[in-house]
Image: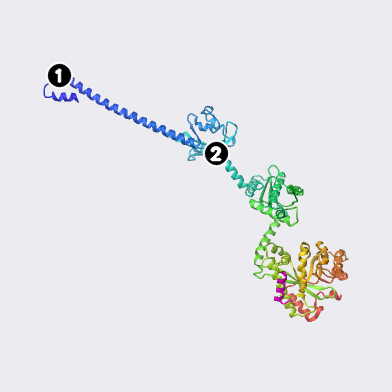
Amino acid sequence: MGVLSVYNRKKKSSFTPKDEILLASLADYASVALDNANLYQHARFEISERRRVEGALRASEERFDLAVRGAKEGIWDLDLLHSRVYYSSRWKEMLGYQDTEIGDEPTEWFHRVHPDDLAPLKAALLNHLNRKTAYLETEYRMCCKDGSYRWMVCRGLAVHNSRGEASRIAGSQADISERKEIDAKLLHVAFHDRLTNLPNRALFMEQVQKALSRMQTDPGYAFAVLFLDLDKFKDVNDSLGHPVGDQLLISVAHLLQDTLGEKDVVARLGGDEFVIFLDYCLEKESAIARARHILSRLTSPIRLGNHKVFISASIGIVLSALGYSEPEDVLRDADIAMYAAKSQGRSTFQLFDPLMRERIVRRMALEADLQQALEKKQLLICYQPIISLRDGQLFGLEALVHWQHPQYGLLPASEFIHLAQEIGLILPIDWWVFEEACRQVKRWQDIYPIQPPLSASLNLGSSLLSHANLLESIQDSLRVTGLPAENLVLEIAESSLSRNVLALSQVITDLREIGASLQIDDFGSSYSSLLYLKDLPVNALKIDPAFVKRITDDGLNIEIPRMIIELAHELGLESFAEGIETPAQLRYLKALGCDYGQGFLFSDSLDAACCAALLEGASLHGVSSFPWHRYWTE
């Protein structure tokens, strides 16, 4: 600035050439000095800015390092061009190594991956590098320094060049062994029974599904399923308590496991139901042999603390050779076979037959229809004549319920009464039969005054016997229908008496006091009631029809009917024979002094219209009108 001032002041005066050269040099110098000052200031700014960026970068790196350490993840960076990998200290530490113990080779990573997991890892890497996946994420096991394996999750992202080639991929690795352990426990709980630790239904069905799939590709493969249900397990719970019952289930589970082959599976479905998968079971004999072996093992008592428990089982067997496609169908048919075995008695097995399924389908249809049978008035009563064997006179009518099914036609009681008991309909059906029969017989008494007056024989089943107000209810029914009590004959099955004879003795006494007659039905099928027979206030013994039907034309098998008839007469009781089908049976029973009888020889059960026609003929023509009268005149 000073040089320019001097130059301006002397501009008006003349300068020598030497002065002008000097001044020009001074001006150039001043300009250069100014440029250098500007460069200096700019350099200082650049240095300051660089220091600021480096500080920010260090802070960012520190934050990243802190975040990684906080997340407990190890960092890796794979240079694909030079086949080198950077492994962070944390990455090495997770495997139990010091920082200097692992180099930068890819083998340091891949050689430590579990052999079963290596192929999936390489496939995941290749898919991402080829841009088939947006990012890399996979799980695998890695071998640690101590030889153990731990689960890792690996995540990464590849960098591609302008030609679309992957040149680098970097990411993280985290230890997820604890999560995997929790997942495994949850999975075990989800697929195993908590009490016995056996596989549950879901896992068993998965096993069956795999077997069915294998059958599609291996024609020589076959399997079998055994469905096992303990007999009378409820009695153990009721008598010894549920804790003992649980211990019994655990013991049975261990016993069944001891019978398994290498690839067989036993599972608990719930309650006292178990299923067994028999792998590569080609012949039904093999499955039957296994079932017999299990039943044999169960015959030995099981000791549970201070208790010695005897248990048996019913087993249903189903073979894959029947051609299944769904595991649910296999289990369903095994269950059906098990119930078929249970119906045969304790400690037995049944091989599934497709006819069993048809019976079950029919039973289910009957069950659904039976719920509405009373409401739709499909039930009807047929009456079988009871004959005096002394003179062929009509003594009474036994009321037998039938079901006029819209699809299956007229069904006898034997087709549906047990079903009614199981589904809780037996009591309303029994009361309906009782009142309807009393009402009908009283109506016939009024219309057809035959002598002696017609009696109504009715079965007093277990549902009515256990009724709290049985006596009062019967009295009410007799009052409503008008049937005299002395014309009411109540039949009680011998099996019912043998189960509760002391309690029923008072019931029988009360019914006798109102004038009703009591018979022991099916006598001879159970001998335990003989101990109490003398003290029971009954009127008659009715011989089990199985003994009557066995009497041959030449008089064989007559011993038991003779004994029962003589016993009845010794006790001052009357004797009845049911199931008379041949003239020879009638002849021998008459000779033995049997008082009354019924059966197909005389008449099948008749509907109300046919019965009315029979009674009308008797009222007009007497005993000679009866179709069986010839057996007393021949």
> Nearer the N terminus, badge 1 or badge 2?
1
User: Which structural element holds mark 2?
Assistant: loop
Q: Which region is colored magenta?
A: 470-483
Magenta stretch contains residue 485: no
- Determine whether 351 is above or below 47 in the image: below
- Determine whether 622 is above or below 431 in the image: below
* Location of residue 244 in the rendering, given as x and y in whole percent from the top left corner: 70, 50
User: Please, what is the three-letter code of the amino acid marked with disc 2?
Assistant: Ile
Residue 164 or residue 54, whichever sits in front: 54
In the picture of the structure, the residue carrying the numbered disc 2 is 176
**Main SS class of the magenta portion in the image:** helix
Tell me the mark number nearer the camera, choosing from 1 and 2. Answer: 2
Is 388 on the left or on the right of 322, as rendered? right
In the picture of the structure, the residue carrying the numbered disc 1 is 17
Residue most extreme to the front:
306
- Residue 341, which numbered label? none
- Determine whether 468 is above or below 110 in the image: below
- At 26% across and 26% down in the image, what residue appears? 35
User: Which structural element holds mark 1?
Assistant: helix
- At 58% across and 42% down in the image, what residue appears? 182
From mark 1 to mark 2, how far is it between C-alphas?
A: 90 Å
Query: What crowding class fits label 2: few (fewer than 14 Cα within 10 Å), some (14-19), or many (20 or more)?
Result: some
User: Please, what is the three-letter code of the amino acid marked with disc 1?
Assistant: Pro
- Say if residue 144 shows up in the picture: yes
* Location of residue 169 in the rendering, given as x and y in whole percent from the top left corner: 48, 34
Residue 8 or residue 410, whichever sits in front: 8
In terms of image quadrants, where is residue 558?
Answer: bottom right
* Location of residue 189 in the rendering, given as x and y in whole percent from the top left corner: 61, 46
Magenta stretch contains residue 479: yes
